Amino acid sequence: MRELRISIVVIVTILMCTGVTMVFSSSGIYALQNTGQSAYYLKRHLFFLFVGLCLTIGVMAMDYKILQKQAKPILAFSVFLLVLVLIPGIGHEHNGARRWFHLGMFSFQPSELAKLAMLIYVSDFLSRKQKYIRDFFQGFVPVILVLGAVCLLILKQPDLGTSVFTAVITLFLMFIAGARPLHLGSLIFLALPVVYLLIIRVPYRLARILAFLDPWQDSRGIGFQLSQSQIALGSGGILGIGLGHSMQKLFYLPAAHTDFVLSIIGEELGLLGTSAMLILFTLFIWQGARIAKRTEDPFGYFLATGIVMSIGLQAVINIGVSIGALPTKGLPLPFVSYGGTALIFHMMAVGLLLNISRRQDI
C-alpha cells in the first residue's frame, strides 16, 4: 500500500501548505490591529505544525496495536481532562464556554483528545466483541454508556456540535460492525427530542438556526457571519481577486482564519481554489477508504475507517457552513484552518492511518 501512503502524504502536505498561506493572508491585518505583529497567527500556526509533525512521526514509529491495549486508559485520561476543564480556575472560559486549558502560548482543547480516544476505544471494543455486536446488552449498551458519558461532559462545556459529531462517528462504526439497525434507529429516535430542546432552549443555538435559514433577513445581526461568507465566496468569481487581496478579511468576516478560511480562499483564489480544496478532500477520503478496505486487522480496520470518516465529515461540515448549506458550527477545516489542538490531532490521526497502512505490508 506504499502508493496509497505516498498519495495521502502528498494530499495532506498540499492542504497544510495551503493552510499556512491562507492563515497568513486572512489573519495578517487582523493580527496587526490586535497584537501589533502581522505574522502573529502565522508564527503560532507554524509552531503548531512543528509540534504536530513531531507527534506524528512518533505515532508512525510505534506499533499502532499498542493503542488497542491502552484503549481504556487513554479514554479514562480523556474523560479526566473533560472533567478537569469544567473546574473554574483550571479550565479557561471564553465567550461563555469553558473548553480550553491555557499552557503558556498553547491552548489545549481536551474534546479533541476525547474524539480520538473514543475512536480508539470503539475500534478496540468492536474488534473484540464482533460476535456480540448484535446483542443489546453485551454489544450495544456498553458503548452507548461510554459515549453518553463523554458527550454529556462535552455538552457541559457547552459544545453541542462536538457531542453530536462524536456520536455520529461512533454510531457509524457500530453500524458497519453489524449492530442492529433497530437498536441504532431507536437511539437516534430517542435522542432527537433532546437535541431539539438543546437547540430551542438555548438562545445562541436558536439564533444560529435562524441565521442559517435566512442570513439576509438580519444580515447585520445574527446573519452577519453567514452573509459575509457568501459575499466573500461570490466576490471571487472563477479565478479570484488575487492572493492577499481579500476585502472581507478587513474586519468584515469574523473568524476568517479559523472557521471561515474557505470563504477567503474562494474570494482570493476563486472557484478554482475552492474546487481544488474539494478535490483534495475527496481524494483523501477515497485513498483513506482504500487503506481501510485493505486492512485485515479488525482493530486497524475500524480505526482507519473512523479516522477517514472523522476528517472527511469535518471537512464536509466546514465547507457546508461556509457556503450556507449547514448551520454555523465552530469546526475548523482540517489541515487548513488556524487552530492548534485540532491541527495537531488531525496530523496525529493521519500518522495513525499511515501506520496502519505500513503495518499491513510487514
Image (spheres, helix red, strand yellow):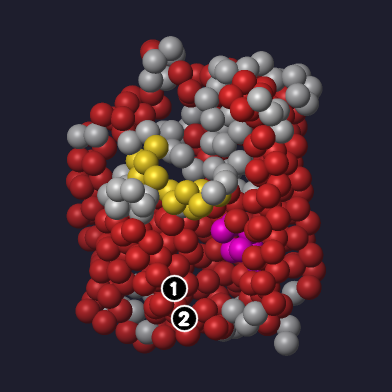
Query: Residue 8, located in which quarter of the rendered image?
Result: bottom right
Please say if 252 is above or below 1.
above
- The residue that appears at 30% across and 69% down in the rendered structure is 146
Relative placement, left or right, of 184 versus 59 is left
In front: 21, or 90? 90
- The residue that appears at 20% across and 47% down in the rendered structure is 194
Read off the residue under disc 2.
Answer: 70
Q: Position of residue 19 (x, y in %)?
A: 70, 42
Is residue 310 rendered magenta in the image?
no
Give the amino acid type for the residue marked by disc 1 in the picture: Ile
Q: Position of residue 292 (x, y in %)?
A: 60, 71
Q: Position of residue 171 (x, y in %)?
A: 37, 63
Relative placement, left or right, of 143 versus 124 is left
Give the amino acid type for the residue marked by disc 2 in the picture: Gln
Is residue 350 rendered magenta in the image?
yes
In front: 309, or 92? 92
Please say if 103 is above or below 221.
below
- Part of the protein shown in magenta: 345-351
For the stretch drawn in magenta, what is the main secondary structure? Answer: helix
Read off the residue under disc 1.
Answer: 74
- Res. 180 in view: no
- The residue that appears at 29% across and 56% down in the rendered structure is 153
CB contact under 8 Å: marks 2 and 1:
yes
